[in-house]
Image (tube, rainbow, N blue to C red):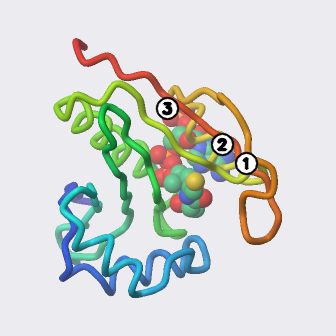
Amino acid sequence: MDLRIIELGKKHLNDCVDLDQKSLNGIWSRSQWERELNEPKRICLGIIELDTKKILGLCSAWLVIDELHITFIAVHPMHRMKGLGKFLLSDLIKRSKSLQANHIHLEVKDKNEPAKAFYKSMGFKTVGNRANFYKDGSDALILNKEINNKS
Ligand SMILES: CC(C)(COP(=O)(O)OP(=O)(O)OC[C@H]1O[C@@H](n2cnc3c(N)ncnc32)[C@H](O)[C@@H]1OP(=O)(O)O)[C@@H](O)C(=O)NCCC(=O)NCCS
């Protein structure tokens, strides 16, 4: 597979809505995705398969002062466990260094074992939790990764 990371914009709206549906049962509505893709302070990245032009994974994040907050990351269910998530998150981490971020921060569902294993393998540490954080009453773990801008 010939893959590349690209910055996503409004022309990728349908791809984002579709991948969100397939991966997380649509955590954001179409209009939320529209806002996300039009907001200049957001970093939205996708993995594109060059032959088919399909978006196989995507992530979105906000930079607030020196902290990057990841709000969404998903890989198409047919392409998981092949290193795509790592490829995407490593690229986001590289970009966050050039944006002078010192920490990366996110929430993950306490019950989401694949995502927890994924973040652990990427060096994230649990720094707290929020009870009843999600609509279904699940708790969230707060994860953090320190960024060394010199490396
Ligand atoms: C979490 C997610 C993005 C991981 O993407 P992926 O492309 O499958 O992950 P990778 O293949 O790059 O795996 C990277 C590491 O995570 C680990 N990992 C990923 N999925 C795993 C699973 N199901 N079980 C155990 N470990 C897993 C891998 O073992 C790998 O570790 P290694 O590098 O030490 O071998 C993907 O499972 C996904 O899209 N899930 C649904 C959406 C979601 O839950 N997003 C997170 C919301 S907070």
Q: Position of residue 125 (x, y in %)?
A: 60, 26
What is the crowding at mark 1: few (fewer than 14 residues within 10 Å), some, or many (at least 20)?
A: few
Residue at disc 2, secondary structure: helix
* Front-lying residue, 40 or 73: 40
Three-letter amino acid code at disc 2?
A: Lys
The yes-or-no answer for disc 1 within 8 Å of ligand 1 is yes
Residue at x 60%, y 48% (from the top left corner): 107
The yes-or-no answer for disc 3 within 8 Å of ligand 1 is yes
Identify the residue under disc 1: 113
Residue 61 can be seen in this image: yes
What is the crowding at mark 3: few (fewer than 14 residues within 10 Å), some, or many (at least 20)?
A: some
Residue at x 19%, y 35% (from the top left corner): 99
Identify the residue under disc 3: 122
**Count of marks placed on residues:** 3
* Front-lying residue, 81 or 135: 135
Check the image and report above or below for 68 versus 27. above
Upstream in the sequence, badge 3 or badge 1? 1
Check the image and report above or below for 128 versus 26. above
Three-letter amino acid code at disc 3?
A: Met
Identify the residue under disc 2: 116
Upstream in the sequence, badge 3 or badge 2? 2
Q: Position of residue 106 (x, y in %)?
A: 53, 44
**Quarter that holds the N terminus:** bottom left
Asked if disc 1 and disc 2 are in contact, CB closer than 8 Å, the reply is yes
